Image (cartoon, coloured by chain):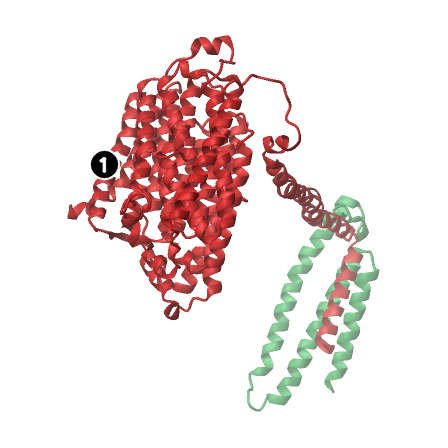
Amino acid sequence: MTNIVQIIWLIPFLPLIGFLINGLGRNFLSKTATGVIGSGVILISFLISVLVFFSVKGGNTEVAHYFNFINTGSLKVGFDFQIDQLSSLFLLIITGVGFLIHVYSTSYMHEEEAKDFAKYFAYLNLFVFSMLLLVMGANYIIMFIGWEGVGLCSYLLIGYWFKNNDYNNAAKKAFIMNRIGDLGFLLAVFWLLNKLGTTDYHQVFALVADTQKSQLTAFDITGITLLLFVGATGKSAQIPLYTWLPDAMAGPTPVSALIHAATMVTAGIYMIARSNILFTMAPTTQGVIAVIGLATAVLAATIALKQNDIKKVLAYSTVSQLGYMFLGLGVGAYTGAVFHVMTHAFFKALLFLGAGSVIHAMGGEQDMRNMGGLKKYMSITHITFLLGCLAIAGMPPFSGFFSKDEILAGAFAKNPVLWVVGVLTAFMTAFYMFRLYAMTFSGKFRGTHDQEHHLHESPAAITFPLIILAILAVIGGWIGIPEVFMHGGHRLEAFLEPIFAQSNVIAEKHELPHSTEYILMAISVAGALLTLLYAWNKFSKYEKSEEVETGFGKVLANKWYVDELYDSIIVRPLRSLAAFFNNVVEKNIIDGFVNGVGKAVNYGSRQIRLLQSGQVGTYVLLMVFGMLVLFIIQLFL
Amino acid sequence: MPVYYYIFLAVALFSIGVIGVLTRRNAIIVFMCVELMLNAANLLLVAFSKMHYQLSGATNPHAAGDAQIFVFFIMIVAAAEVSVGLAIIVMMYRNTHSVDVNFLNRLKN
């Protein structure tokens, strides 16, 4: 398979074609045709990605140059694709999970009109195209195109049901918050261009490692990495820009699964893992990333404890898990972070799709207080969901255990305090996931009679992706079995080794003694098990009550009032500033000036008009005065 | 005769014309005063022409005629102007039964 590189351009190109066909043909394509085209192009991309993966696994990495994207003066930015271990792994996740979600969508969105159905698939294909561009680009500029593209598609899909104004506001919020982060990314790219004159990964990383040659100071590297991280906080929903992600649940559930859980939000992690050498050279930034990641993980997990909307719990759980990944990146456990991206893509997509299946069966109901006892009606959804919950809770041997453990071990090696907080977050994760599970699937049904009558297992197009993802969520972690269990069991680390080779040279190695690692694992598993049993106990017999949250619980249920805080310190001051400019500056100063010019001319001409008295003598007198003035100027000046 | 005699005379004539135009309301007299100013200018042209000829006559014998001819042009134009002006005054009299220029104020403001 030496010539596989010649067709890698097909991987992003096919979804683009799918977008064009579905988008332009939305008025005359049938739903079946739309679904087949939309899913089919992703399937072909996935098959090519598999070929690429095996080609890369054989040590075949390459940069393919297509044309010059920017060519001015000394600046040349090529439209290049880079295929290596990291991008091929992401290709598999994006196209693989993406394909399953497309299949799922054909059933989930079936009640939409054919036109809207095609619009949905067009957006979804465009999203996959942008995401593939993001991971395949061989320089930061191409990555930035994809980076912006996924932001746009996220906006379009969150606001898919645009007739609901709340959804529109959620879409705008996501877009604006992403834009704030994107600005940081863009500034970092400019900084890189200014200092190094190139954005090609190969050249940048080579130059960065060789600071003598590139003249990069520690300040430059810290600045660039911090700005890149600002970009990542926007896209990957970290403090302070995370509030858009829970609101993004306004979109259709498969969209939440694909964009806001499995792929787009991991773009920040991909970007940092890609630029790992830059970040390894900037320990300050790493510290910031670790702290922000952990803080996000804790904050989001505490909020998730008290949410009652099934999708909101999953959304905060996503934010929390993303925080974990950033913790991994911050402590230098790059492989662990990428590993967690992969396992998270499996189990979080599974959980979202399972939630979608539940919502579908409940006729659009998302409040868990009105669910309960669904395991009787939906056995496949129930079992796959349970597997997903176990995986995210970090139970061995499910996938979440391995990836989470690796990040936690990395955190312990760096600083045990990070580990303690991380483990507490893991307990909270186990708690809220089993609260979700127990409230949804066990106990008695608490919904209306109509809903109960309507309950049914979802069709095959929905259960098939669930089953596949459940299998992946169970076995996905087995490619990264830690050294303590099996020598050479961490095949992912060996696979990704070339990507992080540069960093591994610089970074100090933290090898934990095996006994310590066993103890750490035992603590996290035992703790998670206890909390999940506690949650199960507490919520499996959940009865609807009118009890109002008080004290701290109320703070959590209201998401720490962060939205309100942002509203009062950013949105409202901005609004009043705008109102000030509108009422005072615009109305008095600018309008006053514009109207003043008109009025002055009007007034002046009314006065000057009086000179035209009609008296011939006056005219002549003025003429004589004029002549005298001319004489005086001529003679004396 | 020194040239400033002519200049004084011309200035006096011109000033009389100006004052006449400014002070009188009878259109015909105003008109005559305008002619007076015109002829003051003509007188100056002729006088300066003569003066310059005396200064440079040895080198350019034809220079003497230039300004004199120019004065004839002005007189011809003035004659044409007089005919038009008098016609206007006649029309004015027909309309207002007066030659007082202060009645011509219907375009004011």
**Chain that appears red:** A
Circle 1: element type: helix
Residue plotted at (72% across, 73% down): A633
A289 relative to B21, above or below:
above
Mark 1 crowdedness (10 Å alpha carbons): few <14, some 14-19, many ≥20:
some
Q: Is residue A268 visible?
A: no
Residue plotted at (46% across, 24% down): A437
The residue that disc 1 covers is A47
Question: Which is nearer the eye, A625 or A288?
Answer: A288
Q: Looking at the picture, how far across and down is residue A446, in whole percent?
A: 52, 14
Residue plotted at (67% across, 81% down): B48
Q: Looking at the picture, how far across and down is residue A429, in whole percent?
A: 48, 34
Q: Chain of mark 1?
A: A
Q: Does residue A34 appear left or right of residue A253 in this picture?
A: left
Q: Looking at the picture, how far across and down is residue A527, in whole percent?
A: 47, 35
Name the residue furthest right.
B23
Q: Looking at the picture, how far across and down is residue A203, in whole percent?
A: 33, 61
Q: Does residue A287 appear left or right of residue A565 in this picture?
A: left
Q: Does residue A480 appear left or right of residue A316 in this picture?
A: left
**Chain that appears green:** B
Amino acid residing under circle 1: Leu
> Which image quarter: residue A212?
bottom left
Q: Is residue A616 visible?
A: yes
